[in-house]
């Protein structure tokens, strides 16, 4: 009788070990989504050298919601780890960053200056004390874009999230917006253990 219990316990142990060993990183991961909103206000006078001297109000309106969404990543991860009781985080990767107009014009009415297409390029950098500035996401923007998906880079952001990071946004514009452009910024971050 004891032999059956030992064999059963051994079999359960082996099966559990096989199942645990066959788990890949994807089964020990989850996504965190953060978001923020802003309105890029129309510019009445657009400097002729817009590519060189971007009006401060445009830079701030693009930069602020990206920085806000990025700053929520660390606390959101901490909250989710505590809720799931998962243990220490091993890796944090940006999976997606998007900017989307809240009220885009009808497709037939889209122009370069009433959509996100007034922007040419946006780059998002993260930095922290003792580490070089790191390009985390970038986007080249189509002229009539109402939504922009950023290219994310395969960079582990865990050291930056652990130590507290700052976000810097570089913006290049083609034109100035002729209307107010309300937008949402959403990030999706992959957290693995």
Image (cartoon, rainbow, N blue to C red):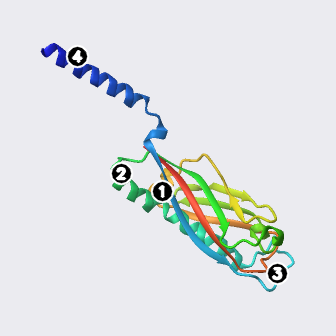
The residue sitting at 28% across, 24% down in the picture is 13
Upstream in sequence: badge 1 or badge 3 = 3
Mark number for residue 84?
2
Q: CA distance from mark 1 to mark 4?
A: 47 Å
From the viewer's side, name the closer residue of 159 and 23: 23
Which residue is tagged 1? 161
Q: CA distance from mark 2 to mark 1?
A: 19 Å
Residue beneath the point at 58% across and 62% down: 186
**How far apart are the alpha carbons under marks 1 and 3?**
38 Å
Side of 133 relative to 31 (left or right): right
Left or right of 192, for residue 109: right
Q: Quadrant of the C terminus?
A: top left
Q: Which residue is mark 3?
A: 46
Disc 1 and disc 4 in contact, CB within 8 angstroms? no
- Gap between marks 3 and 4 measured at Cα: 80 Å
Please give the count of numbered marks on the rendered protein.
4
Q: Tag on residue 7?
A: 4
Where residue 12 sits in the image (x, y, percent)? 28, 24
Q: Nearer the viewer, residue 102 or 106?
A: 106
Disc 3 element: loop
Q: Residue at x 57, y 59 (%)?
A: 187
Q: CA distance from mark 4 to mark 2?
A: 34 Å
Image depth: mark 2 or mark 1 in front: 2
Taking 37 as reference, is 5 left or right? left
Residue at the left extreme, as displayed: 1
Label 3 crowd (10 A; few <14 / some 14-19 / many >=20)? some
Mark 4 neighbour density, 10 Å: few (under 14) some (14–19) many (20 or more): few
In this rendering, is residue 98 above or below 113?
above
């Amino acid at each position: 009788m004891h032999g059956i219990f030992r064999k059963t316990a051994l079999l359960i142990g082996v099966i559990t070990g096989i199942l645990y060993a066959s788990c890949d990183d994807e089964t020990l991961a989850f996504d965190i989504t953060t978001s923020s909103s802003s309105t890029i206000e129309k510019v009445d006078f657009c400097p002729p050298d817009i590519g060189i001297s971007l009006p401060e109000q445009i830079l701030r309106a693009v930069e602020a919601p990206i920085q806000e969404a990025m700053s929520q990543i660390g606390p959101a991860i901490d909250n989710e780890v505590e809720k799931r009781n998962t243990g220490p985080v091993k890796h944090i990767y940006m999976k997606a960053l998007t900017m989307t107009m809240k009220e885009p014009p009808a497709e037939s009415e889209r122009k370069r200056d009433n959509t996100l297409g007034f922007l040419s390029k946006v780059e998002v950098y993260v930095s922290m004390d003792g580490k070089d500035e790191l390009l985390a996401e970038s986007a080249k923007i189509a002229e009539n874009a109402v939504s922009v998906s950023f290219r994310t880079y395969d960079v582990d952001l865990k050291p930056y999230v652990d130590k507290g990071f700052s976000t810097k946004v570089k913006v290049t514009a083609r034109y100035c917006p002729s209307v107010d452009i309300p937008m949402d910024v959403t990030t999706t971050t992959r957290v693995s253990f």
